[in-house]
Image: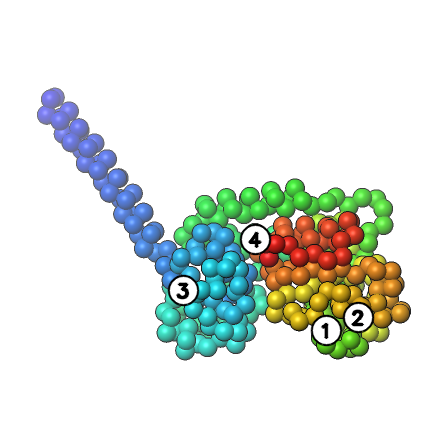
Amino acid sequence: MTGVIAIKRNFSKRLIVFIALTFLTNINRAALAAPQRILSLAPSATEILFDLGLGEKVIGVTEYCTWPPEAKSKPNLGDMMHVNLEALVAMNPDIVIISSMNGYLRGQIEALGYPVTVVYQDSFDEICNSMLEVGEACGIPDAAKKRADQLRSVVDGLSMKAGGGKKQRVLIVVGRDADDASFKKIYVAGRRSFYDDLLKRSAAANAYPDDLPYASISMEGLIRIDPDLIIELVGDHGMTNVDTESIFAQWEKLKNVRAAQSGNVAVIRGDFTFRAGPRYPLILESFKKAIHEGTREIRPDHN
Protein backbone atom coordinates (compact mmCIF):
# COMPACT_ATOMS: atom_id res chain seq x y z
CA MET A 1 0.00 0.00 0.00
CA THR A 2 2.82 2.38 0.87
CA GLY A 3 4.32 1.79 -2.57
CA VAL A 4 1.03 2.58 -4.25
CA ILE A 5 0.75 5.85 -2.27
CA ALA A 6 4.32 6.76 -3.25
CA ILE A 7 3.56 6.07 -6.91
CA LYS A 8 0.43 8.26 -6.71
CA ARG A 9 2.43 11.06 -5.08
CA ASN A 10 5.15 10.86 -7.72
CA PHE A 11 2.52 10.81 -10.46
CA SER A 12 0.81 13.87 -8.95
CA LYS A 13 4.12 15.74 -8.76
CA ARG A 14 4.92 14.87 -12.36
CA LEU A 15 1.43 15.95 -13.45
CA ILE A 16 1.85 19.31 -11.70
CA VAL A 17 5.27 19.81 -13.28
CA PHE A 18 3.86 18.85 -16.70
CA ILE A 19 0.95 21.30 -16.37
CA ALA A 20 3.29 24.10 -15.21
CA LEU A 21 5.72 23.51 -18.08
CA THR A 22 2.85 23.39 -20.59
CA PHE A 23 1.46 26.67 -19.21
CA LEU A 24 4.85 28.39 -19.41
CA THR A 25 5.46 27.02 -22.89
CA ASN A 26 2.10 28.36 -24.08
CA ILE A 27 2.95 31.78 -22.62
CA ASN A 28 6.32 31.77 -24.42
CA ARG A 29 4.66 30.71 -27.66
CA ALA A 30 2.08 33.49 -27.32
CA ALA A 31 4.85 36.01 -26.69
CA LEU A 32 6.75 34.81 -29.74
CA ALA A 33 3.57 34.81 -31.86
CA ALA A 34 2.69 38.39 -30.96
CA PRO A 35 3.94 40.78 -33.68
CA GLN A 36 7.16 42.55 -32.74
CA ARG A 37 7.44 44.67 -35.90
CA ILE A 38 4.23 46.58 -36.63
CA LEU A 39 3.82 48.79 -39.69
CA SER A 40 1.01 51.37 -39.56
CA LEU A 41 -0.30 52.83 -42.80
CA ALA A 42 -3.05 55.08 -41.40
CA PRO A 43 -3.14 57.88 -38.80
CA SER A 44 -6.09 56.33 -36.96
CA ALA A 45 -4.25 52.99 -36.78
CA THR A 46 -1.11 54.69 -35.45
CA GLU A 47 -3.08 56.47 -32.73
CA ILE A 48 -4.74 53.23 -31.68
CA LEU A 49 -1.39 51.39 -31.55
CA PHE A 50 0.22 54.04 -29.36
CA ASP A 51 -2.90 54.32 -27.20
CA LEU A 52 -2.68 50.57 -26.53
CA GLY A 53 0.97 50.84 -25.49
CA LEU A 54 2.35 49.29 -28.69
CA GLY A 55 4.28 52.35 -29.83
CA GLU A 56 7.71 50.79 -29.28
CA LYS A 57 6.81 48.00 -31.72
CA VAL A 58 5.79 50.37 -34.50
CA ILE A 59 8.54 50.34 -37.15
CA GLY A 60 7.01 52.72 -39.67
CA VAL A 61 4.16 55.17 -40.30
CA THR A 62 2.85 57.57 -42.97
CA GLU A 63 3.43 61.30 -43.30
CA TYR A 64 -0.02 61.94 -41.81
CA CYS A 65 0.74 59.99 -38.63
CA THR A 66 1.57 62.98 -36.44
CA TRP A 67 0.01 61.91 -33.14
CA PRO A 68 1.24 61.21 -30.60
CA PRO A 69 4.41 63.32 -31.14
CA GLU A 70 6.54 60.17 -30.78
CA ALA A 71 5.02 58.84 -33.99
CA LYS A 72 6.80 61.54 -35.99
CA SER A 73 10.16 60.03 -35.08
CA LYS A 74 9.28 56.72 -36.77
CA PRO A 75 10.45 55.91 -40.32
CA ASN A 76 8.05 57.51 -42.80
CA LEU A 77 6.68 55.62 -45.82
CA GLY A 78 5.05 58.76 -47.24
CA ASP A 79 1.51 59.04 -48.54
CA MET A 80 -0.90 56.50 -47.03
CA MET A 81 -2.79 56.24 -50.33
CA HIS A 82 0.29 55.47 -52.44
CA VAL A 83 2.51 53.09 -50.49
CA ASN A 84 5.86 52.00 -51.87
CA LEU A 85 5.57 48.22 -51.65
CA GLU A 86 9.32 47.73 -52.14
CA ALA A 87 9.96 49.91 -49.09
CA LEU A 88 7.34 47.90 -47.20
CA VAL A 89 9.08 44.62 -48.03
CA ALA A 90 12.44 46.10 -46.99
CA MET A 91 11.00 46.88 -43.55
CA ASN A 92 9.86 43.24 -43.18
CA PRO A 93 6.95 43.82 -40.77
CA ASP A 94 5.28 41.04 -38.79
CA ILE A 95 1.92 42.72 -39.41
CA VAL A 96 0.57 45.72 -41.31
CA ILE A 97 -2.29 47.85 -40.01
CA ILE A 98 -4.29 49.84 -42.57
CA SER A 99 -7.62 51.67 -42.50
CA SER A 100 -10.81 51.35 -44.50
CA MET A 101 -9.72 54.48 -46.38
CA ASN A 102 -6.76 52.65 -47.96
CA GLY A 103 -8.30 49.20 -47.70
CA TYR A 104 -7.55 48.52 -51.36
CA LEU A 105 -3.96 47.86 -50.26
CA ARG A 106 -4.96 44.76 -48.32
CA GLY A 107 -4.83 42.34 -51.22
CA GLN A 108 -1.48 43.66 -52.44
CA ILE A 109 0.12 43.41 -49.01
CA GLU A 110 -1.28 39.96 -48.24
CA ALA A 111 -0.05 38.76 -51.64
CA LEU A 112 3.44 39.62 -50.42
CA GLY A 113 2.93 37.34 -47.43
CA TYR A 114 2.24 39.89 -44.69
CA PRO A 115 -0.83 39.66 -42.44
CA VAL A 116 -3.09 42.72 -42.49
CA THR A 117 -5.55 44.14 -39.97
CA VAL A 118 -8.00 46.82 -41.11
CA VAL A 119 -9.13 49.67 -38.85
CA TYR A 120 -12.68 50.86 -39.56
CA GLN A 121 -13.78 54.35 -38.59
CA ASP A 122 -17.27 55.29 -39.76
CA SER A 123 -18.74 55.35 -36.25
CA PHE A 124 -17.68 55.28 -32.62
CA ASP A 125 -18.64 51.62 -32.36
CA GLU A 126 -16.36 50.84 -35.30
CA ILE A 127 -13.51 52.71 -33.59
CA CYS A 128 -13.93 50.63 -30.42
CA ASN A 129 -14.27 47.39 -32.38
CA SER A 130 -11.13 48.28 -34.32
CA MET A 131 -9.24 48.69 -31.05
CA LEU A 132 -10.32 45.16 -30.14
CA GLU A 133 -9.22 43.86 -33.56
CA VAL A 134 -5.81 45.49 -33.25
CA GLY A 135 -5.42 44.19 -29.70
CA GLU A 136 -6.29 40.67 -30.79
CA ALA A 137 -3.93 40.78 -33.79
CA CYS A 138 -1.08 42.18 -31.68
CA GLY A 139 -1.40 39.78 -28.77
CA ILE A 140 -2.97 42.06 -26.13
CA PRO A 141 -6.74 41.32 -26.33
CA ASP A 142 -7.40 41.90 -22.61
CA ALA A 143 -5.63 45.27 -22.53
CA ALA A 144 -7.48 46.35 -25.68
CA LYS A 145 -10.86 45.41 -24.22
CA LYS A 146 -10.10 47.32 -21.05
CA ARG A 147 -9.11 50.42 -23.01
CA ALA A 148 -12.14 50.18 -25.33
CA ASP A 149 -14.42 49.89 -22.29
CA GLN A 150 -12.78 52.98 -20.77
CA LEU A 151 -13.27 54.93 -23.99
CA ARG A 152 -16.92 53.88 -24.20
CA SER A 153 -17.46 55.04 -20.63
CA VAL A 154 -15.93 58.46 -21.33
CA VAL A 155 -17.94 58.97 -24.53
CA ASP A 156 -21.18 57.82 -22.91
CA GLY A 157 -20.59 60.40 -20.20
CA LEU A 158 -20.07 63.16 -22.77
CA SER A 159 -22.95 62.20 -25.07
CA MET A 160 -26.10 64.27 -24.94
CA LYS A 161 -29.62 62.87 -25.09
CA ALA A 162 -31.80 64.33 -27.79
CA GLY A 163 -34.67 66.29 -26.33
CA GLY A 164 -38.09 66.81 -27.78
CA GLY A 165 -37.23 70.16 -29.36
CA LYS A 166 -35.99 70.88 -32.85
CA LYS A 167 -32.39 69.85 -33.47
CA GLN A 168 -29.91 72.20 -35.07
CA ARG A 169 -29.08 71.20 -38.64
CA VAL A 170 -25.29 71.27 -38.81
CA LEU A 171 -23.15 71.08 -41.94
CA ILE A 172 -19.65 69.71 -41.37
CA VAL A 173 -17.16 71.09 -43.90
CA VAL A 174 -14.13 68.79 -44.04
CA GLY A 175 -12.28 70.48 -46.89
CA ARG A 176 -12.24 73.31 -49.42
CA ASP A 177 -9.77 75.62 -51.11
CA ALA A 178 -9.59 78.65 -48.84
CA ASP A 179 -7.53 80.50 -51.44
CA ASP A 180 -10.61 80.40 -53.64
CA ALA A 181 -13.29 82.42 -51.85
CA SER A 182 -15.85 81.55 -54.54
CA PHE A 183 -16.72 78.30 -52.72
CA LYS A 184 -16.89 76.41 -56.02
CA LYS A 185 -16.25 73.07 -54.35
CA ILE A 186 -16.97 72.25 -50.71
CA TYR A 187 -16.36 68.81 -49.21
CA VAL A 188 -18.82 67.85 -46.50
CA ALA A 189 -19.46 64.91 -44.17
CA GLY A 190 -22.43 62.71 -45.01
CA ARG A 191 -24.56 60.38 -42.94
CA ARG A 192 -22.22 57.41 -43.27
CA SER A 193 -19.24 59.22 -41.76
CA PHE A 194 -18.21 59.21 -38.12
CA TYR A 195 -19.10 62.92 -38.02
CA ASP A 196 -22.77 61.99 -38.28
CA ASP A 197 -22.24 59.84 -35.19
CA LEU A 198 -20.65 62.84 -33.43
CA LEU A 199 -23.59 65.08 -34.34
CA LYS A 200 -26.08 62.59 -32.92
CA ARG A 201 -24.11 62.40 -29.68
CA SER A 202 -24.16 66.22 -29.64
CA ALA A 203 -27.99 66.22 -29.93
CA ALA A 204 -27.81 67.75 -33.40
CA ALA A 205 -28.69 66.66 -36.94
CA ASN A 206 -26.60 66.38 -40.07
CA ALA A 207 -27.75 69.02 -42.55
CA TYR A 208 -26.37 67.04 -45.50
CA PRO A 209 -29.23 64.72 -46.48
CA ASP A 210 -27.61 61.91 -48.46
CA ASP A 211 -26.47 58.51 -47.20
CA LEU A 212 -22.81 58.95 -48.18
CA PRO A 213 -19.57 59.12 -46.16
CA TYR A 214 -18.43 62.35 -47.83
CA ALA A 215 -19.56 64.46 -50.74
CA SER A 216 -18.65 67.49 -52.81
CA ILE A 217 -21.24 70.24 -53.06
CA SER A 218 -21.40 73.47 -55.04
CA MET A 219 -22.45 76.91 -53.90
CA GLU A 220 -25.93 76.14 -55.22
CA GLY A 221 -26.01 72.94 -53.16
CA LEU A 222 -24.97 74.86 -50.06
CA ILE A 223 -27.78 77.37 -50.58
CA ARG A 224 -30.33 74.55 -50.98
CA ILE A 225 -29.16 72.82 -47.78
CA ASP A 226 -29.19 76.15 -45.88
CA PRO A 227 -27.91 74.76 -42.52
CA ASP A 228 -28.51 76.33 -39.11
CA LEU A 229 -24.82 76.03 -38.27
CA ILE A 230 -21.67 75.41 -40.30
CA ILE A 231 -18.66 73.78 -38.66
CA GLU A 232 -15.48 74.02 -40.72
CA LEU A 233 -12.64 71.68 -39.78
CA VAL A 234 -9.14 72.99 -40.44
CA GLY A 235 -6.23 70.59 -40.06
CA ASP A 236 -2.49 71.13 -40.06
CA HIS A 237 -2.39 69.70 -43.59
CA GLY A 238 -5.19 72.01 -44.69
CA MET A 239 -5.61 75.76 -44.67
CA THR A 240 -2.75 76.43 -42.26
CA ASN A 241 -1.85 79.76 -43.87
CA VAL A 242 -5.37 81.16 -43.55
CA ASP A 243 -6.23 82.69 -40.18
CA THR A 244 -9.61 82.14 -38.60
CA GLU A 245 -10.80 85.72 -39.05
CA SER A 246 -10.16 85.45 -42.78
CA ILE A 247 -12.20 82.25 -42.89
CA PHE A 248 -15.10 83.98 -41.12
CA ALA A 249 -14.85 86.92 -43.54
CA GLN A 250 -15.12 84.53 -46.50
CA TRP A 251 -18.29 82.96 -45.14
CA GLU A 252 -19.84 86.34 -44.35
CA LYS A 253 -19.79 87.19 -48.06
CA LEU A 254 -22.34 84.44 -48.76
CA LYS A 255 -25.55 86.45 -48.83
CA ASN A 256 -27.92 83.55 -49.46
CA VAL A 257 -26.77 81.26 -46.61
CA ARG A 258 -28.51 82.03 -43.32
CA ALA A 259 -25.79 80.53 -41.11
CA ALA A 260 -23.13 82.65 -42.79
CA GLN A 261 -25.16 85.84 -42.44
CA SER A 262 -26.11 85.21 -38.81
CA GLY A 263 -22.56 84.41 -37.67
CA ASN A 264 -23.35 80.74 -37.16
CA VAL A 265 -20.03 79.49 -38.53
CA ALA A 266 -17.58 77.73 -36.21
CA VAL A 267 -13.98 76.79 -36.98
CA ILE A 268 -12.31 73.89 -35.21
CA ARG A 269 -8.57 73.77 -35.84
CA GLY A 270 -6.26 70.79 -35.48
CA ASP A 271 -5.58 67.45 -37.15
CA PHE A 272 -7.39 65.67 -34.31
CA THR A 273 -10.68 66.60 -36.02
CA PHE A 274 -9.85 64.21 -38.88
CA ARG A 275 -8.74 61.26 -36.73
CA ALA A 276 -11.39 58.66 -35.99
CA GLY A 277 -9.58 57.08 -33.07
CA PRO A 278 -8.89 57.37 -29.34
CA ARG A 279 -9.22 61.17 -29.44
CA TYR A 280 -12.90 60.89 -30.34
CA PRO A 281 -13.89 62.44 -26.95
CA LEU A 282 -11.90 65.59 -27.80
CA ILE A 283 -13.80 65.99 -31.07
CA LEU A 284 -17.11 65.41 -29.30
CA GLU A 285 -16.31 68.07 -26.70
CA SER A 286 -15.41 70.51 -29.50
CA PHE A 287 -18.66 69.81 -31.36
CA LYS A 288 -20.70 70.42 -28.21
CA LYS A 289 -18.95 73.75 -27.64
CA ALA A 290 -19.72 74.87 -31.19
CA ILE A 291 -23.32 73.64 -31.22
CA HIS A 292 -24.55 74.39 -27.72
CA GLU A 293 -22.18 77.00 -26.28
CA GLY A 294 -21.83 79.19 -29.35
CA THR A 295 -18.02 78.95 -29.40
CA ARG A 296 -16.89 80.06 -32.84
CA GLU A 297 -13.17 79.22 -32.77
CA ILE A 298 -11.96 76.07 -31.08
CA ARG A 299 -8.31 75.16 -30.91
CA PRO A 300 -7.65 72.64 -28.10
CA ASP A 301 -4.14 72.56 -26.63
CA HIS A 302 -4.18 68.79 -27.07
CA ASN A 303 -4.56 68.23 -30.79
The residues bearing labels 4 and 1 have C-alpha atoms spaced at a distance of: 29 Å
Whichever of labels 3 and 1 marks the residue nearer the N terminus, that label is: 3
**Amino acid at pointer 1:** Ala
Asked if residue 7 is positioned above or below residue 224 in the image, the reply reads above
Q: Is 256 left, or right, of 175 in this rendering?
A: right
Determine whether label 3 and label 4 are within 8 Å by CB. Answer: no
**Amino acid at pointer 3:** Ile
Residue 2 coordinates in the image, percent (x, y): 11, 22
From the image, tell me which residue sits under label 3: 59
Whichever of labels 2 and 4 marks the residue nearer the N terminus, that label is: 2
Residue 57 coordinates in the image, percent (x, y): 39, 59
The residues bearing labels 3 and 4 have C-alpha atoms spaced at a distance of: 20 Å
> What label does residue 223 carry, if any?
none
Mark 3 burial class by Cα count in 10 Å: few <14, some 14-19, many 20+: some
Whichever of labels 4 and 1 marks the residue nearer the N terminus, that label is: 1
From the image, tell me which residue sits under label 1: 178
**Amino acid at pointer 4:** Pro
From the image, tell me which residue sits under label 2: 250
The residue at the point 21 percent across, 38 percent down is 17
Mark 2 burial class by Cα count in 10 Å: few <14, some 14-19, many 20+: some
Secondary structure of the residue carrying tag 1 is loop
The residues bearing labels 1 and 2 have C-alpha atoms spaced at a distance of: 8 Å
Asked if residue 107 is positioned above or below residue 264 in the image, the reply reads below
Dot in front, 3 or 2: 2
The residues bearing labels 2 and 4 have C-alpha atoms spaced at a distance of: 33 Å
Q: Residue furthest top?
A: 1
Foreground: 225 or 133?
225
